Image (cartoon, rainbow, N blue to C red):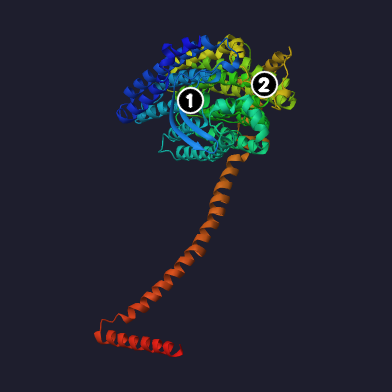
């Protein structure tokens, strides 16, 4: 079966999955920048072909490798060595390759399909924008970068595409560069992720030196990890692994590096949809899963991931309960769901985390596309300007209902199956504090999502809506509603069998903490908590009159509500730290040293040289008699010194 796979059509043409979005970027960027409609159609065609080849390749991979043990479910259709280095550890080979295993197959399918649907949606969303051609070029670059990241075979390749994802996201977030808020948000995202990526690069170099390789297969090899843990100081490996995880920490916007993600909403809504669903923000989760055996052999990273992930999930969910900007609610929802994925990896829920990454991509992308359609209709992001849109936007209404039920974990929608697996992983690991934090976060998720749903589509119309649902924007929503509703139920059995935890080293401290079993009460409790959150949202926001909701949504709010509404003043603290301490404090101190010390020394030296120059200039009178007199006096004085020395000898 393996030989059949390598000789198959889709395996031999797998490079086209990357080539089509790259071609779209080049053609749109060079030739169609001023032709938005043509650029959009060409981008859709390229994204569609990329998705077809990705799905075909995934199908052939599952057919060929699905029945093999998890350690053997690996294929590399093509590989190109672009640099070979000789070091004290031997020969280091750097390659650009196409790596396939269960999670990379899942990711290329999700990324390519989401990119295709977002491109279709963007034709309707950007049809009046003069920069539409540039937008489609950058969207294609983003898709190419993410696809290159998930099929990387080594850390050098993944870092190259990791940075390409960062650059393209910076350009997309700041696409409307005439808006100061968009420019500020793009710079914030770029700087914070680059800060984390500096640690990532340092970790890559350090572990590459310790293990003598940059390949994932070498890093995750259980036998080699056992030997490395004996020969290499465990502390060095722990430090290096944490450095690598910091890169994932920043890219997936875990607390306290989370503030760039909600502010990234300043970009066009299709950008928000593709960044928050299956691409940039899950890159950190994907990296952690990709290096799971290595991290498990060290142990430190998984402990950090558990704590940070659980806290981020709860922290972001609390903030989302009070926000009024529809896109920011979804942004904090993404943060919370990323926390779910990360703490699932931390407690050993490898398959559960990847399953939630899979299901989350579809219903979160649909939620952002719906938010964009609503904003397009009412010309506002604020929930206060919405309401009563159920009849005007029937497709968006039912799509949003399905997505909210899915993300709330209500059965039988897709989010229920993946969230149930995450909670089960925490329970089986014996980490009950994380389990109850995840359970409570699920209730909050149901509450704030249905708060958004009821305030947007139910009640009386509070703003002014114009037009109707755009066909280009409606079709992707309808398509995404199907996997959001059914994908979890249809794929949970297959996913649990196909995406299994990779082999771990025998000395991994993580192995001892894993147990098995499925408490029968867990799905019912998780569903009940989600339904309770939905019921509270209905009681406060769906009824025609609610004094409690009116008091909370008015300008006169309790102090605790204001603290949460202002996101615990974390943004203000960040700006105070950067602008007050770093810019005015540290930078001001360094500026003073530069001015009063370094510049002063330079000015002193320059002054002395100027004084000497003026002194020399005084004797340059231009009179021959003066020059001759000085010359004769000099000769006489020199002869006198010479005679004096000779006499003493």
Q: Quadrant of the C terminus?
A: bottom left
**Would you place residue 175 above or below residue 438 in this image?**
below
The quarter of the picture where residue 207 lies is top right
Residue sticking out furthest to the front:
649
Mark 1 residue crowding within 10 angstroms, few (<14) / some (14–19) / many (20+): many
Residue 113 lies, in percent from the top left, at: 46, 18
Write down the residue under mark 1: 274
- Identify the residue at horizontal 34%, vertical 85% (top origin): 634
Q: Secondary structure at mark 2?
A: helix
**Would you place residue 204 above or below residue 611 in this image?**
above
User: Which of the numbered marks, if any, corresponds to residue 612?
Assistant: none
Closer to the camera in the image, 80 or 88: 88
Residue 476 lies, in percent from the top left, at: 45, 16
Task: Give the alpha-carbon distance from disc 2 to disc 1, as whole Å.
Answer: 31 Å
Closer to the camera in the image, 73 or 91: 91
Sequence-first disc among 2 and 1: 1
**Would you place residue 120 above or below residue 603 in this image?**
above
Residue 62 lies, in percent from the top left, at: 52, 11
User: Which of the numbered marks, if any, corresponds to residue 536?
Assistant: 2
Closer to the camera in the image, 440 or 461: 440
Asked whether residue 301 appears in the rendered view, the answer is no
Q: Is residue 245 left or right of residue 617?
A: right
């Amino acid at each position: 079966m393996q030989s059949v796979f390598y000789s198959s059509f889709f395996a031999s043409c797998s490079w086209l999955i990357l080539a089509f979005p790259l071609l779209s970027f080049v053609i749109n960027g060079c030739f169609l920048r001023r032709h938005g409609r043509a650029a959009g159609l060409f981008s859709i065609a390229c994204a569609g072909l990329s998705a077809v080849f990705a799905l075909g390749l995934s199908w052939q991979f599952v057919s060929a490798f699905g029945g093999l043990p998890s350690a053997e479910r690996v294929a590399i259709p093509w590989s190109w060595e672009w640099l070979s280095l000789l070091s004290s550890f031997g020969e280091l080979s750097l390659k650009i390759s196409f790596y396939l295993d269960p999670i990379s197959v899942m990711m290329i399918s999700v990324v390519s399909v989401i990119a295709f649907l977002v491109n279709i949606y963007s034709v309707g969303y950007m049809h009046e924008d003069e920069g539409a051609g540039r937008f489609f070029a950058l969207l294609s670059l983003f898709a190419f970068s993410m696809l290159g990241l998930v099929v990387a075979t080594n850390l050098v390749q993944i870092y190259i595409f990791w940075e390409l994802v960062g650059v393209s996201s910076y350009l997309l977030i700041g696409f409307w560069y005439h808006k100061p808020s968009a420019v500020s948000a793009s710079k914030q995202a770029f700087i914070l992720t680059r800060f984390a990526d500096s640690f990532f690069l340092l970790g890559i170099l350090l572990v590459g030196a310790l293990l003598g390789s940059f390949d994932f297969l070498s890093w995750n090899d259980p036998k080699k990890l056992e030997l490395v843990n004996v020969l290499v100081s465990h502390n060095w490996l722990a430090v290096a692994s944490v450095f690598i995880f910091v890169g994932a920490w920043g890219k997936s916007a875990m607390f306290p590096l989370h503030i760039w993600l909600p502010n990234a909403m300043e970009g066009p809504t299709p950008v928000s949809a593709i960044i928050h669903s299956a691409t940039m923000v899950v890159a950190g989760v994907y990296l952690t899963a990709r290096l799971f055996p290595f991290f498990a052999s060290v142990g430190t990273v998984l402990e950090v991931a558990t704590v940070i992930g659980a806290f981020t999930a709860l922290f972001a969910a609390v903030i989302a309960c009070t926000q009024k900007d529809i896109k920011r609610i979804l942004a904090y929802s993404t943060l919370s769901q990323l926390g779910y994925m990360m703490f699932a990896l931390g407690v050993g829920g490898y398959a559960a985390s990847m399953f939630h990454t899979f299901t989350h991509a579809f219903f979160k992308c649909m939620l952002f596309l719906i938010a964009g359609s609503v904003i397009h209709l009412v010309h506002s992001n604020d929930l206060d300007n919405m309401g009563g849109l159920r009849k005007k936007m029937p497709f968006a209404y039912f799509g949003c209902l399905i997505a909210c039920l899915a993300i709330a974990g209500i059965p039988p929608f897709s989010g229920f199956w993946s969230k149930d697996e995450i909670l089960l992983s925490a329970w089986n690991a014996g980490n009950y504090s994380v389990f109850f934090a995840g359970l409570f976060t699920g209730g909050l998720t149901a509450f704030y999502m249905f708060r958004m749903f009821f305030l947007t589509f139910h009640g009386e119309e509070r703003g002014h809506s114009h037009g109707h649902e755009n066909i280009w924007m409606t079709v992707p929503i309808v398509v995404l509603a199907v996997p959001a509703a059914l994908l979890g139920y249809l794929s949970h059995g297959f996913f649990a069998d196909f995406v299994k935890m990779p082999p771990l080293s025998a000395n991994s401290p993580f192995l001892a903490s894993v147990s098995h079993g499925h408490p029968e009460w867990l799905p019912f409790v998780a569903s009940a908590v989600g339904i309770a959150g939905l019921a509270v949202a209905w009681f406060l926001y769906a009824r025609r009159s609610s004094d409690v909701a009116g008091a909370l949504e008015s300008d006169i709010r309790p102090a605790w509500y204001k603290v949460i509404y202002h996101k615990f003043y974390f943004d203000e603290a960040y700006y105070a730290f950067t602008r007050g301490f770093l810019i005015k404090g540290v930078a001001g101190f360094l500026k003073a040293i530069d001015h009063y010390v370094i510049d002063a020394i330079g000015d002193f030296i320059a002054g002395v040289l100027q004084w000497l120059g003026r002194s020399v200039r005084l004797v340059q009178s231009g009179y021959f008699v003066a020059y001759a007199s000085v010359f004769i006096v000099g000769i006489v004085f020199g002869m006198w010194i010479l005679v004096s020395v000779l006499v003493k000898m």
